Amino acid sequence: MKLMKVFTLDEALTNIKDGMTIMYGGFGGVGNPPTLINGILTKGSKELTLIGNDAGFPNIGIGKLISQGRAKRLIASHIGSNPVAGKLMSDGKLDVEFSPQGTLVERIRSGGMGLGGVLIDIGMNTSFSENKKVVELDGRQYLIESALTADISIVFAKKADTYGNLIYDKSARNTNPLIAMAGDLTIAEVEEIVPVGKLEPEEIITPGAFVDIVIQTEGVDWKWVWE
């Protein structure tokens, strides 16, 4: 078992290929991994399918990839904070699948837990339920929502040890722990890296077993949210 999971940004980016499905942590930009996102932009990766809570902002977080046309498909709960995403969708240049926020995180959690999907009653008998499978359980009808996984998950954390155990900071935790579990390969961008044994076990939110690569962040672009 490899205990040292710390790599450079360039080494981490060798895993990113055109056409991949990338799942990203964050909520309105907060908790997005900006160094990885900027690296993907610089690399020129394109035709990506992105899965995350939202479309960020045009020039903050995941919104940069979307605004520059690097994504062909987006699965998210809303895109209202990024008007560029809305225009791309209206122009037929971005395929957007909307999933209610609670349903979205449950689909991601199911993917990370190895489940096939979840049953929901949100949107029954509306346009949302069109073309979705319906099952009956205990006399009630539910829609089947498939689990979500990704080729690569990219997350942001406050601190990691060299094995990849992660600690998050306040609201920047948001969807990151669930997304860290749902990727075939998970890359964590972190503020501080410490040796194994330096983290208190009860502080750890994401066990290193779910993390393959750790990189040092070059700084975030969303601190304004807390100012």
Image (cartoon, rainbow, N blue to C red):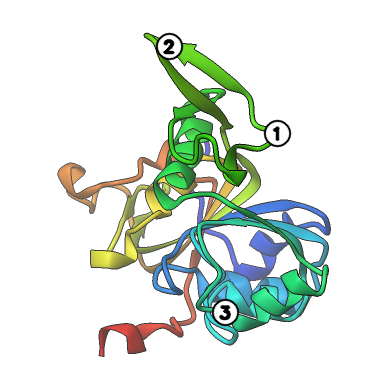
Q: Secondary structure at mark 2?
A: strand
Tell me the CA gap for discs 1 and 3.
28 Å
Residue type, numbered disc 1? Asn
Q: Which residue is mark 1?
A: 131
The residue located at (36%, 40%) in the rendering is 207
Residue type, numbered disc 2? Leu
Q: Which residue is mark 3?
A: 82
Q: Secondary structure at mark 3?
A: loop
Tell me which label, 2 or 1, sits earlier in the chain: 1
Q: Secondary structure at mark 1?
A: loop
Q: Position of residue 128 (x, y in %)?
A: 58, 44
Tell me which label, 3 or 2, sits earlier in the chain: 3
Tell me, yes or no, whether the two marked residues, 2 and 1, touch with CB atoms within 8 Å.
no
**Which of 224 and 162 lies nearest the eye of the viewer?**
224
Dot 3 crowding, Cα within 10 Å, few <14, some 14–19, many 20+: many
The residue located at (47%, 50%) in the rendering is 100
